[in-house]
Image: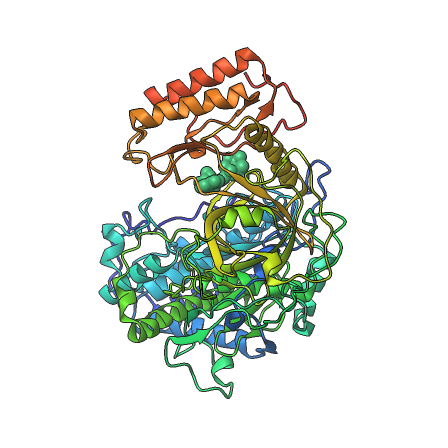
Amino acid sequence: MSLPAPPQKLDLTNTLSAPVPPGFLDQDAAAQQLEEILSMPPPALALPMPVGDTPIRLGYPTRFFYDKHIDKSLQLRGIKPATTFLDQLNDLAGQYLGELRTNAQYTSMPGNSLTLRTRNTGPFKPKNTGVPGVAQYLRHCVDFSLRISSRVFLFPRAPDWNAYLLWVRLGREGEADSRLAVDEIHALALPSTTEGKLDLDEDELLYLSPIMHSNLEKLQSRSDSIGTWVVMTPSAKAESLITSLNRATIPSDRNAGTRGFPGLPPSTRLVPPDSPEPAWSTVSSANEPPPSGWKLQSGGAEHSSEDILPAATRRPRSTAFDYGELTPESLIQLGWARAVETDSSVIVFTCGTLERIAIRHRKTQTLYLSDLINITQIRHPPYLKLQVGLYIAVLKDAISRLHASEIASPELRRSTRKRRAPEDDPLGNQSKRRKVGTGSVVSRTFERPQSAIKIAGGLDFMLLYLRYGMHDSPAPASFIRSVPCLVSADDPEEIARPSVKRKYTREECIVVILGPKIGTGATGIVHTASLEVIDAQGRTVTANIVVKTAFLAEQQEKMRHEFQVYRRLAAHKVKGVPEVYGIFDDLEGGAIILLMSHCGSTLWDRRIDPTRPGLRLDVKPSQRTRLLAIVDAIHAAGVRHYDLRPPNLMIDDGGRAYIIDFDVAQLDPTEGGKRRERRALVDLLFHGSYPDFSMRSPPSTVASTNGDSDE
Ligand SMILES: Nc1ncnc2c1ncn2[C@@H]1O[C@H](COP(=O)(O)OP(=O)(O)OP(=O)(O)O)[C@@H](O)[C@H]1O
């Protein structure tokens, strides 16, 4: 069987010239034929067996760490059935298809264009294994549904059935974790240009109403995707999870376990509205009045007491993230968290054989679950028609919510954003953040506050709060120091592994408040953060820092190796690399974090005219000289970096240059290796020449210590 074509844009070139005049085509016969096409059962999925012996797990991805810190006003509070939802989707599809016939908009028999896969030729065998294979299968199955919903909802006057809507995996998240049998970031998307604008050509514009055009542009500027699809590989376990979703309860322990922690000043959050005219009646029949617009809610932690009780009093056996088994509860939590992050109203749980559709009602923080769908067997309504109704419902909901938020929050209309950066507020809201911590204790002396970093260097216990996007920790995570601060420790060679106390006072705690992500790499996710401690005079002193988080065992191994390299550099007093304030371990396991100084932005992000071929770096002569001096100092300390690329060369706000990212660096390299590395840096800085600008980090050679092996 032929593989599915990649998602196409509307191609009207062959059809523009010769639409059949209305009246010449039997509209009833055309509508009947389309119904027949939509009644075809999808083929069964024959997923190839994975090669090799990497076990794949139905576990919660590492995002679990972040999902424990969702703002209370956005968390799931209830689960209810939506037993009529599938019929409603069927009716919605029927309504739009009916309009096509009533308006005599069939210009050819649908079967002429939609014949490609109408014959049942046995099971569908995707090329890929695992979740990508299931995604390929689903894309194949719903190709007609995408074309038909594009036509009836967006281009009813177009003469043919080309797909405009896309069903995709969100690119910004990078590769899926190939060890997991679940991936929860598939969505519906509108095609966009490389500049992040709506991708519409002249022919498409011809058939798009000006109102719909403006709606789509606004939608595109808000978000690059709509809806949340949680895709699993088919198995008895996955089927049982989807089947038993309706019996899931809300877990009571889904936040970090720290108790008695200090509350942060409340932040004001704009909670986005539900649609005032939902495409589904299931939810509006709830007793609550429909929301009228954007609503302010206060978030922030609520507890406060003298003693802070850590989440655990012993270090975890392993700090590495352990996927664990998915349960119906955690599967729902996974879908809900992604829906909050992408501001989706619809969540589809699918494993290529069974499926459930869920609606997220924001106001009541409730998830409404449809009846179970058997993809190949469901006849009433048929699967393909159900999908047409679903895509229309998702679009209608997104557009209606767009209007509701515009009425209540006119400044959102002025959005000129081209493409949402990964960490832009996914709610599209302008959460007002107060500067945290300063002034909470009134100073009575004129002494200079002690440096926050110096004080933090002497403390072992840390409370980690998340405060950006959908995050506002209901409870902070408890972390314990596992290596010393390289700036203030008397003897950074000493590995300090403090034990965990039963309770801590506020003065004994470092408070770190994570802000948005600024980078991701092989080691982990990097955030800006604010660090706060109390000085000897009782004043709160703060510092802006950067925090790198590592979850999986191999990431943590890299991070600990990176720390050893920084320790060597600190011992040789090398300047021009990040100051490192220690690694801390999550007392509930699953994460370690490295605290370091902020070194500005990368030369890669600062390159001149990235649209033109060739690398043109924005680097001043004095910065070049400093970068070369830094690499000389690094080499003199007996370290070879091994990854001197533009994303690892930084310039801070004061114009000072830095070199970061030592996770693949090697100790005690050969002299020849150091010379070659310096020459490569000269080539990069003076000639913009570099082997492959899109190259990722070379594979880690952490175990070896004298590597010249990559040359
Ligand atoms: N100290 C810092 N100051 C400012 N930004 C930083 C700092 N450390 C990291 N970043 C940002 O985070 C990104 C990823 O960090 P880093 O390269 O250290 O991570 P990694 O996981 O080791 O990546 P790689 O896959 O390249 O080895 C950097 O490109 C940079 O944008």
- Residue 232 vs 608, above or below: the answer is below
Taking the spot 56% from the left edge, 49% from the top edge, the residue there is 456
Q: Position of residue 221 (x, y in %)?
A: 32, 57
Q: Is residue 350 visible?
A: no
Q: Position of residue 120 (x, y in %)?
A: 57, 53
Taking the spot 55% from the left edge, 12% from the top edge, the residue there is 671
Q: Quadrant of residue 367?
A: bottom right
Name the foreground residue: 218 vs 271.
Answer: 271
Residue at the outermost top position: 672
Taking the spot 61% from the left edge, 47% from the top edge, the residue there is 458
Taking the spot 44% from the left edge, 87% from the top edge, the residue there is 289
Residue at the outermost bottom position: 287
Name the foreground residue: 379 vs 566.
Answer: 566
Q: Quadrant of the N terminus?
A: top right
- Residue 57 vs 217, above or below: the answer is above
The answer to whether residue 544 is left or right of residue 618 is: right
The answer to whether residue 598 is left or right of residue 239 is: left
Name the foreground residue: 369 vs 668.
Answer: 668
Q: Is residue 207 visible?
A: yes
Q: Position of residue 325 (x, y in %)?
A: 72, 56
